[in-house]
Amino acid sequence: MKILLPLLLIPILLLAGGIFAYREMVAAGNPGYLIIGFGSWSIETSLFLGLVGLALGFVALYLGIRLVINTVRLPSILKQRGGAKRSQKSQEALIAGLLESAEGNWETAERNLIRHAANSGVPLVNYLTAARAAQSRGAYEQRDEYLKLARDSMPEAELAIGLTRAELQLSDRQFNEALESLTQLDQLAPSHAKVLKMTHQVYAQLEDWEGIRKLIPKLHANKVMMEAEIRLLETDTYSALLKRKAETKNAGALRDAWLDVPEHIRALPGIQHLYFAAMIEAGAGAEIEPRLRQLIEKERSDTLLVLYGCIQLADPAKQLELAERWQARQETNPVLLRVLGKLALRAQQLEKAQGYAQASLDREPSVEAYRLMGDILLQQNQATKACLFFRNGLLFAANEAVAQIDLDGDGVGDLPATTAAGEETLPAGDA
């Protein structure tokens, strides 16, 4: 079309030039004429009319060429206009589908999104949004079909499509399916933050602590979580792994699991207490006794003292002698006194055991101290008095439980109170 425009200027210039020349010739008294011959035919006319005819001929030629070109281009023009119209409809349908989806009209949203998806400039958005709508109304097969169509429409967006699939599966608690999808994505993008974060979420839901343990280095290296979150996750993970090993009551397996725990986690008191308790439960208390005793000598910890009292060595008298060294620093500690009484009972030093147990009760009554005193009295063949201590221990436990319930004190006075010596006292109203 741009080529024809200069051609159109030719007759205009010729006509303008002819008019100018004609005026000059008329002024000179000679208007001139034009003869065109073709074979035996000839046409004679004035110069002015000849120039006008020539200009009109050029205009007709130009219009004819334009007509031919437009006729040839007509199909493509119609196709282009139809495509623009379909694209506009698709865009309107996409907007309508997004609005319907936001309003929770899932079926309507699907229809709007899928009907014109093929003509959309971004069909991926249509299919992914339709997949979410199908998920929301529980049409899982339809959801997977939309995701397949999304992949067919844009294969290079495999990561985005896979993340959408895993996210939908995770939200629907399809944890195994989500883990399979994320495993495939991990091969495609091993360091992708969202893939790693969602994998952690799936492992946590499945309580797959071994999987989380293997994932932690990637989470740390790719800064998916904050440092404090990583430390907390490590603590929870290795605690859970130790607890599972503790259920087997296999000291060898527990030892191996402990060696797999990073040193900075092993140094945490809670992890240490868990390991010691598990080893004692597995019958390997003698193995961890030196380390436990070393920690007790460094710091005062009631939990460590209780754990030490649960260890049964071959020579209980020697164990009692070692434990009594701590009394100088913790003379008034009721927990230590109770542990010493327990060790003395195990060593059959009954008078010493009774003294330690009574001292513990005097300083801080507890269910454990009442039970210990009852066990000592049974060994001394004082069954009646032992039963009184057992009973008072149960009453003390009941009072403790009631005290934790916020009932403004209602009903607490209905239970008998007990003294440290094991003598039962009655409420004032029953005296």
Image: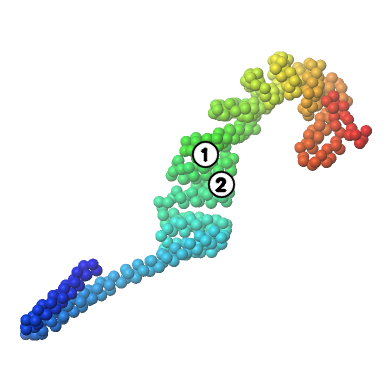
From this viewpoint, which residue is outermost toward the right?
431
Q: Which residue is mark 2?
A: 175
Q: Which residue is mark 1?
A: 225
* Residue 216 x/y as whole percent: 52, 36
Disc 2 element = helix
Q: Residue at x 57, y 39 (%)?
A: 208
**Residue density around tag 2, few if under 14, some if 14–19, many if 20 or more, within 10 Å:** many
Q: Is residue 229 above or below residue 118?
A: above
Residue type at mark 2: give it: Phe
* Residue 246 x/y as whole percent: 64, 31
* Mark 1 or mark 2, earlier in chain: 2
Which of the pair 63/107 is nearer the observer?
63
Q: How many marks?
A: 2
Q: Is residue 390 visible?
A: yes
* Residue 43 x/y as whole percent: 9, 85
Q: Is residue 289 visible?
A: no
Q: Residue at x 71, y 22 (%)?
A: 309
Mark 1–mark 2 distance (CA, rounded to whole Å): 21 Å
Q: Quadrant of the C terminus?
A: top right
Q: Is residue 413 left or right of residue 342?
A: right
Q: Residue at x 87, y 22 (%)?
A: 382
Which image quarter: residue 390? top right
Which mark identifies residue 10? none
**Which numbered mark, 1 or 2, is in the foreground of this view?**
1
Q: Residue at x 47, y 49 (%)?
A: 162
Q: Is residue 326 left or right of residue 229?
A: right
Disc 1 element = loop
Residue type at mark 1: give it: Met
Q: Is residue 312 left or right of residue 258?
A: right
